[in-house]
Amino acid sequence: MNPQFETYLHNYVRLGVRVGVNLQPGQSLVIQAPTTALELVRLAAKEAYAAGARYVHVEWNDDPLTRIRYEMAPEESFGDGPALRAHNYDRLIERDAAFLSLVSANPDLLTGIDPDRVQRATKAMRSAMSNFYDGVRTDKFSWSILAVPSEVWADKMFGHEPAEKRMGLLWDAIFQATRADRDDPVGAWTAHLKQLQEKSDYLNGKRYRALHYVAPGTDLVVELADDHLWVAGDSINEKGTMFVANMPTEEVFTAPKKDGVNGTVRSTKPLNYAGTLIEDFAFTFKDGKIVDFAAAKGGETLQRLLDTDEGARYLGEAALVPHRSPISDTGLIFYNTLFDENASNHLAIGSAYAFSVEGGKSMTKEQLAAKGLNDSLTHVDFMIGSADMSIDGIAADGSREPIFRGGNWAI
């Protein structure tokens, strides 16, 4: 284990509370966490109370219990959403709570489970929690995600290393990716967010009509929503408080036009969705809709994802991430979208974020749809970037300018 582990761990927790959700005095904090993260949750609670939290509420989840449910629960139960949790979250949102999710990847958790059970349960959960997810889409409240290592995750990533070293190696990778290993991690994040904002400002000034992606297996034109905005790593909630939803983040992103995507795109990293790995997959789009797909592994799970609802076959996000980034430079595949999406250009099927268009936070769903934004119960990022990718920005008059060459920024 790194001799500075305790220092980095406290830095990490501090970043989550002070930069991620940017907890304000008098606010309550909701921590969603796996049962394996007890010590980290205690540290986060201490940091939250030191920041002036009114109350810290912890909601636990447990991988073995999740697996037991999918193996043994009656079939009809998978259509039931978490009504009590949804009710409690609605009350917490009304009281201006912030939400910090601690996530731990287990890419093989639901291997062998009927994908239909998983998809029905996921859809029921998203339906019951629609008010919460609408709040996420519109920046109503502060929320952030931090990763927590687990032995299963460490074994997946570092199985070639001695068993006693794997957890330490995973912690080191997380600390590096989140800048928790810096002398001044908060200052490092401030400078990083400024650099991302410079990229989004440049793209917003260009007002491209579309992006054209070209790479092996990829030839895709993505039109952008009317009055779209490029967004960097930080957001502003309805109270005017800045927060950083994903830690790490290396992206600038915006919303595609729902019916304006055409061509083919191939994934470049595995997708861990609902406890199952989907690998080496590709989509064909026509007028925005996925009309064909293939996957070397996890195809049945991918089919269930695309069948979530009508919007699950359309894009909700286009994000730009250089191939040379702190996460990509490690050469690691994390099997966790929080990290892998920040090592690669990526797209997301499903719902778009309302703040991706001018004035979107105050618009109705009908108004957002009129701007070209997609709506869905799901939002799933998948990675498409590589050192071989080129991206052109297409202006309103049809002229082109290079945005990415060789997988990296050309601006």
Image (spheres, rainbow, N blue to C red):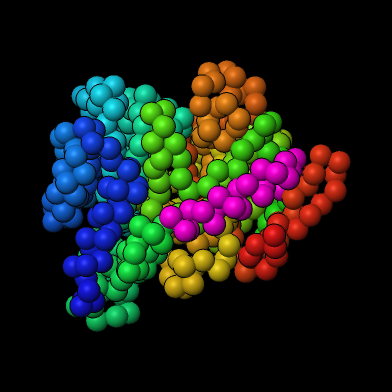
Left or right: where 308 falls relative to 112: right
Quadrant that contains the N terminus:
bottom left
Look at the image and say whether residue 115 sits in the magenta stretch: no
At 48% across and 58% down in the image, what residue appears? 192
Asked if 275 appears above or below 313 in the picture, the reply is below
Quarter holding residue 254? top right
Left or right: where 163 falls relative to 207: left
Residue 114 location, x and y as percent? 34, 43
Asked if 96 appears above or below 168 in the picture, the reply is above
Q: Is the stretch drawn in magenta largely helix, strand or loop?
A: helix
Residue 308 location, x and y as percent? 47, 33
Region of the chain picked out in magenta, as a range: 190-211
Asked if 132 appears above or below 177 in the picture, the reply is above
Left or right: where 195 falls relative to 68: right
At 60% across and 48% down in the image, what residue appears? 200
Is residue 34 visible in the rendered structure shown here? yes
At 51% across and 66% down in the image, what residue appears? 325
154, 122: nearer the viewer: 154
288, 55: nearer the viewer: 55
Residue 316 location, x and y as percent? 56, 38
Is residue 336 visible in the rendered structure shown here? no
